[in-house]
Amino acid sequence: MPGKKRTAFDPVTLEILWQRLLSIVNEADGAVARTAFSSLLRDAHDYTCMFTDRRGRELAQGSFATPGQSGAMALGVKGLVAKLEENAGPGEDGCVDGDVFITNDPWALAGHLNDVCVMSPIFHRGRLVAFTACVFHHSDIGGRVSSDNQDVYEDGLYIPFVKLFDGGVQNEAVMELIRWNVRTPEEVTGDIRSQIAANHVCSEQVCQLLQDYELEDLDGLADEIISRTERSMRDAISKVDDGVYRSEAIIEQPEGKGDIVIRAAVRVHGSDITVDLAGTSDQVDWGGNVVFNFTYAYVFMACKSIFDPDIPNNDGCAAPIHLEAPVGSVVNCRFPAAVAARMQIGHFMTEIVYRALADVLPHRVLASSGGTPATMNVFYGRDSSDGPWHSVLIRGGGMGAAGDRDGETSYIFPANGANTPVEILESDTPLIVETRELLPDTGGPGRFRGGPGRRVVFRVPDDEYAPQPNVKLGIQSGRYRYPPEGLFGGHSGARARFLVNGEPGNPYGLTRLQPGDVITMDAAGGGGYGDPQERDPDSVRRDVAQGYVTLEGARRDYGVVLEPDTLAVDEAATAALRAQPSD
């Protein structure tokens, strides 16, 4: 039976269909969790599934998505669909049923080579109705695994936009090319097959939805959902007074290089927002460069979370948000800049927009977070049996405090991700995790306290299970010189630290480890919000009881005196201490 061309939906039907769309993409997401080979995907969830209408407009994404991937995909997949249309003949779609495309072009999608996109068209009754795509952060993409790479050629294997399947037939040459350019080919090709499976699940379920509701295509439903979302976003933005709101951030670079300056002018004009990054530093000679899509992703993350956090993520909520970034700057770099460590700068974009809008929207922003940027640790080498191993951990720090709550602990913000359990890491690698603990007095003091930082201690075993030397460790991180700042009188959180055998190591390059070496990584604490002297003494008492603040820190940072044995608040001593003039 032919489907209907629907252009209007009553509210109940629309809500049912929207929840069905979400369930489809979440089912594809679940397929990844069941089939992925890498713990970075299976456990840490560093991937994003989505699907679009036939024009490439994002319609729905997984409930647990990574903002850098999803925001960049919203632009990138639309660009890939446009490329197919440009290459198509009259009356053609540029693709056929059974096609599967693959690329990791940083400038087309999510900003570095490890983020590999697999995209598939969805056909229903012989007509193109949608596209489904997923981006996985592959642990291994070959190359020199270090943030101090000089260009993208050192970063790893560059896959242009090509067909992985042509009308249902696998392109063996492409898979063979990938297999021979990575260190752990079985894991990488297994994860690519997981991407294909996720797209298949999404395609099957979209077609089932169209059949169940006797719809010809998704066009009318997409128009309705996207237009409603855009109206909601615009309504929220229009409540802010027109104006230009500015901020500036200083971001550290590797030793011997000057600091990077990011300047932002956030223009609110009616129901539109434009973030102008004119005056930002030029692109750099190491891997911190950011492509336009990735910069936009975290600008979008900031605006979405401030103005309308509860509406769906789709093409509509991105429509009022515009980005201007100078070509050749560190936030809109030119090919062939090295981009492997783009999160070391790109993750700061959300914080920079928050800073610009803090005075006009003080209760919708956060102080700086210790998980900005996220810390990525890439360990690889050969085990005692001469087999290759390769593992990636992404870790957060203390989250910045807000105007109504303390910062959480150990969050990857503004990125997203889950924890890789110690048991998984130790089963996947020869490494031993000796310690994982929160660090007291590292969250920035404030009326609301920043989240404390976290320590992880790794040991390279030197017994019969010792890996072959050298074990390589590539780090992408930050906050070693400049701590996460507080807001409105809140204090900064503690800085990050990287130690090798108790001595400061180089967190910006490739570290070669020997059996017996011990690595200590301290994540930064989040910034505080408001005057610490205004924090409720009972909240300070609770912080001490939970190990977030020491007795000395309570007195020094908050002016709160506690009985050492009972942790009861000494109200008289606290009042006297807080009455003393500050230095």
Image (cartoon, rainbow, N blue to C red):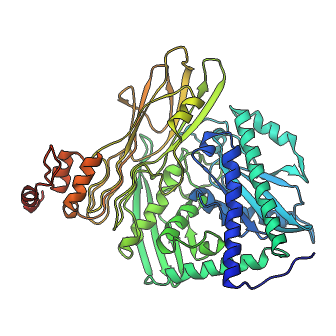
Total numbered badges shown on the rendered structure:
0
Q: Position of residue 360 (x, y in %)?
A: 38, 76
Q: Is residue 170 left or right of residue 219?
A: right
Name which quarter of the figure residue 52 lies in: bottom right
Which residue is at 43% across, 34% downward?
506
Relative vertical location of residue 435 with respect to residue 94 in this rendering, above or below: above
Q: Is residue 301 left or right of residue 160?
A: left
Which residue is at 48% across, 79% downward?
268
Which is nearer the eye, 551 or 236? 551
Residue 409 visible from this viewpoint: yes
Residue 151 visible from this viewpoint: no
Relative vertical location of residue 25 with respect to residue 19 in this rendering, above or below: above
Q: Is residue 172 left or right of residue 372?
A: right
Q: Position of residue 244 (x, y in %)?
A: 43, 77
Looking at the figure, which quarter contains the N terminus? bottom right
Name which quarter of the figure residue 582 lies in: bottom left
Outermost residue to the top: 464
Looking at the figure, which quarter contains the C terminus? bottom left
Q: Position of residue 479 (x, y in %)?
A: 39, 47
